[in-house]
C-alpha cells in the first residue's frame, strides 16, 4: 500500500477553550520561526497574534461577565479558527509543492510539524466484520434458494458460498450479492443445499455465518 501524502490538519482542542489560545500561540511562534520555508501565509504572524490576543481578551471577558460577552467570545473564536485553517491550507500547499519537487515524505512530515500543526492521521483500516445471521431461508420457486441476511452498515456486499449436500463434500460455489436479500438461481430441483454468507468489507477477512440447509424445489 503506498504511503499516504503528509498533510497538516487543524486539530482544535475541544475540551477547554483556553487550550485553543495555547494551540494557536504555538502555531504562531513556530510559523514565525519557520518563516524562511513558509514566507507568505495568508494570515501573517503579526495578524495571527492580533487575533490570538483578541480571543484571549474576549474569553476572559466572557468568563468574568458571563453571557453578556459570550457572543463576542464566540465571534472571536470563529475568526481565530478561520485564520488557523487558512494558514493550514497554505502549509499543505507549500509542502505538496516541495514533494512534487523531490522532498521525501519523512522530510515533509518534519516540515509540517515545524509549523505547530499536527499531522493528519491516516485512517485505521476497519477490522474484520462479524459473522452475519441468516434470518430467513426458503425455496418457493423452482431451482431457486432465497436467503434474507441481517444487514451491517459497514458491509459493501455479501459473499455467498453454497453447495449440494453430498458425501464426500462437494466444492463450494461462490457468488457475490449487493443486497441482503439473496436469490441463488439455477440450482438442481430436489437437492438439499448448504449455504453460508459473509459480509464483504474493506478488510479481506471473511467471517461466515452458520450454515443453513434447504431442499430446493
Image: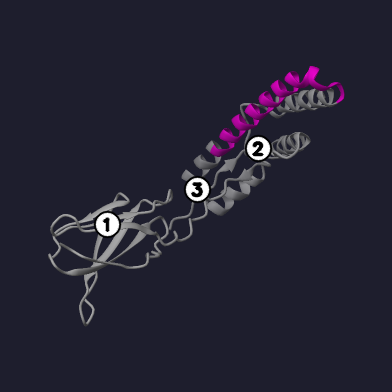
Relative height, residue 135 to residue 114 (above, below) = below
Picture disc at residue 36: 2
N-term mark: 3 or 1: 3
Give how far across and how far down residue 165 sits, in percent.
Answer: 22, 74
Residue 187 location, quadrant: bottom left
> Circle 1 sits in a helix, a strand or a loop, which is it?
strand
Relative height, residue 116 to residue 191 (above, below) = above
Rendered-image quadrant of the N terminus? bottom left
Q: Badge 1: few (under 14), some or many (20 or more) residues near its Cα, within 10 Å? A: some
Tag in front: 1 or 2? 1
Give how far across and how far down residue 142 sits, in percent.
Answer: 13, 57
Residue at label 1? Answer: 176
Mark 3–mark 2 Cα distance, whole angstroms, equals 23 Å
Residue at label 3? Answer: 5
Mark 3–mark 1 Cα distance, whole angstroms, equals 33 Å
Residues at discs 3 and 1 in contact (Cβ within 8 Å): no
Tag in front: 3 or 2? 3
State the extent of the magenta-drawn residues as a range. Answer: 64-92
Give how far across and how far down residue 87 sits, in percent.
Answer: 62, 32
Amino acid at each position: 500500500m503506498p504511503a499516504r501524502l503528509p498533510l497538516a490538519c487543524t486539530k482544535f482542542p475541544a475540551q477547554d477553550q483556553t487550550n485553543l489560545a495555547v494551540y494557536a500561540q504555538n502555531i504562531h511562534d513556530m510559523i514565525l520561526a519557520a518563516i524562511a520555508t513558509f514566507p507568505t501565509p495568508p494570515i501573517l504572524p503579526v495578524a495571527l497574534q492580533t487575533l490570538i490576543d483578541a480571543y484571549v481578551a474576549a474569553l476572559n471577558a466572557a468568563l468574568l461577565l458571563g453571557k453578556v460577552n459570550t457572543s463576542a467570545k464566540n465571534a472571536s473564536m470563529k475568526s481565530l479558527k478561520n485564520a488557523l485553517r487558512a494558514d493550514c491550507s497554505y502549509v499543505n500547499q507549500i509542502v505538496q509543492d516541495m514533494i512534487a519537487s523531490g522532498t521525501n515524505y519523512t522530510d515533509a512530515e518534519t516540515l509540517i510539524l515545524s509549523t505547530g500543526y499536527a499531522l493528519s492521521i491516516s485512517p485505521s483500516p476497519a477490522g474484520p466484520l462479524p459473522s452475519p445471521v441468516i434470518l430467513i431461508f426458503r425455496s418457493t420457486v423452482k431451482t431457486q434458494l432465497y436467503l434474507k441476511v441481517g444487514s451491517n452498515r459497514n458491509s459493501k456486499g455479501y459473499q455467498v458460498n453454497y453447495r449440494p449436500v453430498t458425501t464426500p463434500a462437494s466444492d463450494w460455489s461462490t457468488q457475490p450479492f449487493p443486497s441482503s436479500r439473496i436469490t441463488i438461481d439455477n440450482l438442481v430441483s430436489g437437492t438439499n443445499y448448504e449455504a453460508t454468507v459473509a459480509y464483504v468489507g474493506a478488510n479481506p477477512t471473511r467471517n461466515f455465518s452458520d450454515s443453513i440447509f434447504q431442499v430446493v424445489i
